[in-house]
Image: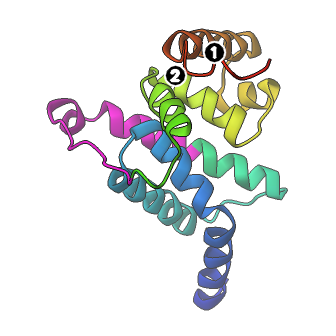
Amino acid sequence: MEQSAVAQGAAEVLDQYGDMVFRTAYAMVKNTHDAEDIAQDVFVSLVRTHPVFVSAEHQKAWLLRVTINRSKSFLRSAWQQRTEGLPEVLSDETFTPRESAVLDAVASLPQKYRQVVYLYYVEGYSSAELARLLHLPQNTVLSRLSRARGRLAILLKGEFDDVER
């Protein structure tokens, strides 16, 4: 494949999946700049390796898997474990107080719970799809979702008492 065709293909993939890759990385590392670096690394890897995909869903799964792996590697890195980043400050106008409370609660969950909550609720994957994507038994995915919901219920107790169930 010639260079311009590769660049054009990469640009299309970036347009289609760039936000998803960034949001996934951000959900795991909780830092905009680190998530941007991880997303860039994922797309550089895509261009360098030229993987062959059988479908758009296969391509999306590959991008998510690489993003998750790069995020985990980042979190395990010696640099990350020995440093503490500056807290992210989002504009108060970005989210309503209720949305901010939910985001803060999800962000406070351990990484393994944040990961399944994000992929299930935001990206719309089923528990069976998550099991395949994360290389986990489906029951483990369901357990993590259940435990995450339980922790969120405790963290958000009283925040949404007026919401009908």
Give residue 19's quadrant in the image: bottom right
Relative vertical location of residue 44 with respect to residue 123 in this rendering, above or below? below
- The quadrant of the rendering that contains the C terminus is top right
- Going by the image, does 98 lie left or right of 72? right
Judge the density around disc 2: few (<14), some (14-19), many (≥20) Cα neighbours within 10 Å. Answer: few
Judge the density around disc 1: few (<14), some (14-19), many (≥20) Cα neighbours within 10 Å. Answer: some
Q: Position of residue 16 (x, y in %)?
A: 69, 67
Q: Find out whether residue 87 is within the magenta segment.
A: yes
Q: Position of residue 30 (x, y in %)?
A: 39, 40
Q: Position of residue 76 (x, y in %)?
A: 32, 31
Q: At x 48% / y 65%, what residue is drawn?
A: 44
Question: What residue sits right under mark 2 in the picture?
Answer: 112
User: Which type of secondary structure does the marked residue at label 2 adopt?
Assistant: helix
Q: At x 65% / y 61%, what residue is drawn?
A: 17
**Magenta part of the protein: which range?**
66-91
- Going by the image, does 79 lie left or right of 5? left
User: Which type of secondary structure does the marked residue at label 1 adopt?
Assistant: helix
Question: What residue sits right under mark 1 in the picture?
Answer: 149
Tell me, what colour scheme is on the image?
rainbow
Relative vertical location of residue 71 with respect to residue 43 in this rendering, above or below? above
Along the line of sight, the residue nearer the viewer: 163 or 3: 163
